[in-house]
Amino acid sequence: MKICVVSDSHDRADALGKAVSNAKEQGAQAVIHCGDLIGAHTLRPAMALGLPIHLIHGNNLGDSVALHKLAGNQLKYYGPDARLELGGRKIFVVHYPEYGRAMACTGDWDLVCCGHSHQAGVERVATVKGGSAWLVNPGTIAGLSAPATWVLGDLDAMRYEVFKLSMAA
């Protein structure tokens, strides 16, 4: 199963929609948003593509009431963090990278996704149980103080690739 991982869209609906569209074209079947969406309206272009979206809120909460009202079959809104199982993998989603690293180190998760820093990165982290987990930060899809980036993940192969977003048609 392939997934699109995004974060820090900061009300940039067009950029979020374009990243999800690009990911869907490459076979993504679900979206994980690691927070700082801000307004619920930001989801409109991405939701129009029909993929399930798993969303946490980050430190820029926005309108949580509107997110709760929008949540349903396609949109799952978890609040400050999420515990998911997708493609047979255990996934933890949190906004802050330091919390993400700590959760990856527990050995309880195959994949931990985070955001906040606006710096994209993919890293294999050693766990206290003697194994490893993947820590993925897609950066900022909004392109604030950094290039606009997102991640395409392959949960079967456990491979993750950072893509720069191009808004050209």
Image (cartoon, rainbow, N blue to C red):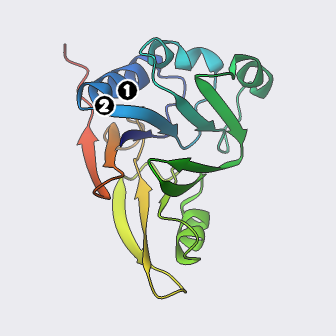
Picture quadrant where residue 3 is located: top left
- Looking at the picture, does residue 31 appear above or below residue 21? below
Q: Is residue 121 above or below residue 30?
A: below
Foreground residue among 44 and 107:
107
Cβ–Cβ under 8 Å for marks 1 and 2: yes
> Would you name the residue on which mark 1 appears?
20
Taking the spot 27% from the left edge, 32% from the top edge, the residue there is 27
Mark 1 and mark 2: span between their CA atoms?
5 Å
Is residue 48 or residue 42 the one in the foreground?
A: 48
Image quarter of the N terminus: top left
- Above or below: residue 121 compared with residue 10: below
Q: Position of residue 92 (x, y in %)?
A: 58, 56
Q: Is residue 23 above or below residue 154?
A: above
- Could you tell me residue 148's position as x and y percent? 33, 36
In the picture of the structure, the residue carrying the numbered disc 2 is 23
State how many labels appear.
2
The extreme right residue here reads: 65
Which quadrant of the figure has residue 2? top left
Numbered mark located on residue 64 in the image: none
Query: Which residue appears at 50% of the width and 17% of the height?
Result: 47
Using the image as rendered, state which of residue 38 and residue 70 is in the foreground: 70
Amino acid marked by disc 1: Val
Q: Position of residue 32 (x, y in %)?
A: 50, 39
99 with respect to 122 (left or right): right
Q: Position of residue 17 (x, y in %)?
A: 40, 20
Could you say whether the residue bearing mark 2 is in a helix, strand or loop?
helix
